[in-house]
Image: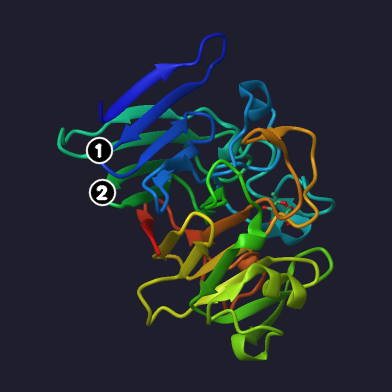
Amino acid sequence: MNVSIEPVTGSPLIKVTLTNNYLSASFYNFGARMHQLFTPNKEGLSENILLSYDSVEELLSDKSYFGAVVGPVAGRIKHAQWKDFPLEKNCGTHHIHGGSQGWSYQFWTIELLEDPDVIGIRFHLEDSVSGYPGPINVRVTYKLVDHSLIMTTDYQSMNPTIVNPTSHSYFNLSGEGQQDLDTHSLLVNASHLLETDKETLPTGKIIPVKELPLDVSKMQSFPAIFSSFKEGLDDCFILNKTLPTALTLTEQTSGRKMEIATTNQSVVLFSTTGFDAPFLINGKPMHSNYGLAIEPQQFPDSVHHPSWPSIELPPLQKRQQETIYRFSCL
Ligand code: G6D
């Protein structure tokens, strides 16, 4: 079976599973979430490489965007204000990740793709509840092509608004959460990093990668990353768009390798450092450095930095972002 769609008994959830001869992925209509992604390790054993809730109830109560499509705008917006338009203050006095009624918390509709030879699924949302100007029509298409998962996000709005969506998936390539990030290594094809303040808001200063405590444009182990970035990663890296791959993540016990390419101009990396919680993820309580959230997107809080690429969306203009996750073994 290449595509299966199954309601989850006793809940409004619908689970969609895509399978090809190398990958298998499951998704939920709640936030168009990437729930599990199975890839083979160096012995050919397929295991889930995402941090995934064990319980449906806890998934429905999620506040940390596990696997979710985040929007209309990913990241923080200072003072929860865009021009003279107020947004929800759901992060202290600021706004984050589309607010409490954002795309991650809405139920999307499901559409089968017309081409029977394509292993994929499409989620649709007409957003008129997030509190942003709209309504905003967005569709996310997930496809399996050989060793790659391709995520395409298309969106447009009836009225002028702002849109900067991302996928907020947490990766752990050891499989089923057997290890933590300390067995992983990372290379980011970034040219710069956005400096942030103590509230994780961009200050406007853009730091060349070569001035960082560790050159992440070369493959670095996470123990080395954690010894240089003492509080872990919760940072936006501006991508060197002359290179086809945005980043490479590897894991030594499984031999897995993931390469990500994206049309986005940056990627936020959140190492879950200090993220301890009682809910079960892959059979263990959520804990610090358990996985890496990889969030391809445009620059955060760009509405307050006019020299940065704009996320403003004129009426009826169609926009698209695409991210490709390619898997192999070392
Ligand atoms: C924290 O600062 C981080 C965000 O980057 C992340 O998206 C969220 O937790 C889940 O707020």
Q: Earlier in the sequence, mark 2 or mark 1?
A: 1
Instruction: Tell me residue 113's x, y (percent).
Output: 24, 34
Residue linked to disc 1? 119
Residue type, label 1: Ile
Q: In this orientation, which residue lies closer to the viewer: 215 or 299?
A: 215
Q: In this orientation, which residue lies closer to the viewer: 272 or 163?
A: 272
Quadrant of the drawing holding the C terminus: bottom left
Direction from residue 92 to residue 128 in the image, left or right: left
Q: Is residue 143 above or below residue 186?
A: above
Q: Given contact means CB atoms under 8 Å apart, are the residues at marks 2 and 1 in contact?
A: yes
Q: In this orientation, which residue lies closer to the viewer: 147 or 108?
A: 147
Quadrant of the drawing holding the N terminus: top left
Instruction: Tell me residue 9's x, y (percent).
Output: 52, 10
Q: Residue at x 76, y 65 (%)?
A: 200
Q: Residue at x 45, y 70 (%)?
A: 246
Q: Is residue 210 above or below residue 278?
A: below
For residue 270, say whether it is visible: no
Q: Can you tell me whether the CB of the residue at mark 2 lies under 8 Å from the nearest atom of ligand 1? A: no
Total numbered circles: 2
Is the residue marked by circle 2 packed among few (<14), some (14-19), or many (20+) residues within 10 Å? Answer: some
Instruction: Tell me residue 302's x, y (percent).
Output: 61, 68
Q: Secondary structure at mark 2?
A: strand
Residue linked to disc 2? 145
Residue type, label 2: Val
